[in-house]
Image (spheres, grey):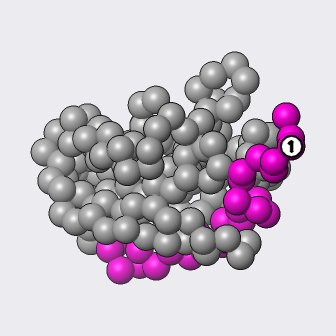
Amino acid sequence: MLWMLFCAGVAIADDSYVHTFTGFTFPSKVGAFTKVKVTPFNAAHSDIEVDYNNDPFTVHLSVYVYPAHGPLKDHFEQCKEAVTTHTPGAKFLEEKPMTLDKSGVKYDGYYALFSFRAKFVDQLDQDLLSQVILFQRGDYYVLFRISYAASDKVNAEAQITDFIDKLAWPAGDGSVPKGSS
């Protein structure tokens, strides 16, 4: 799965997109963000990317939901490595554990921050910040990949926090009840 850093697109219809494997619902608007694209990575649509941009456009936020394939910490290391491998000049700045409380369930995860210089929002090269935030819900990873203009750091980070807080997660912890098939 390749993350497309600078997704351009036109807002799709006002419909919410439901990931049937997990019950995640992605509305057309969340806080300051408008959904611009949904990309399935396989025919079953179990592996998806949902892209959002804020207005005015200073932040590109992608949410990936896809089957888990190993320990969360190991996958987080792979996600960090992907940033430095696929983003020329990316510099690792910080990493920390995170806990997210959704629908009364606490999810432990990881956060990393990177910086780099690149063209963004059809402007000349500028300083950018990029976050990798990873959680696991049941048998699925939930990955946030977010890039934004460093010059808009305070506003962008407030909008990102608001998005993550407002994006509803399905009830329960995503585990399959015992006795279910």
Q: Amino acid at mark 1?
A: Gly
Q: Is residue 105 part of the magenta span, yes or no?
A: no
Q: Quadrant of residue 114?
A: bottom left
Q: Is residue 159 part of the magenta span, yes or no?
A: yes
Q: Residue at x 81, y 50 (%)?
A: 177
Viewer-side residue, 127 vs 82:
82
Q: Residue at x 46, y 55 (%)?
A: 134
Q: Quadrant of residue 48?
A: top right
- The image position of residue 25, as x and y in percent, is 76, 53
Label count reads 1
Q: Residue at x 44, y 44 (%)?
A: 71
From this view, report whether residue 171 is shown above or below residue 144: below
**Which segment is the magenta one?**
152-181
Location of the C terminus by quadrant is: top right
- The image position of residue 22, as x and y in percent, is 74, 46
- Label 1's element? loop
- The image position of residue 45, as x and y in percent, is 70, 29
- The image position of residue 28, as x and y in percent, is 73, 56
72 relative to 172 in the view: left or right: left
Q: Residue at x 42, y 31 (%)?
A: 2
Q: Which residue is mark 1?
A: 179
Viewer-side residue, 17 vs 76:
76
144 relative to 75 in the view: left or right: right
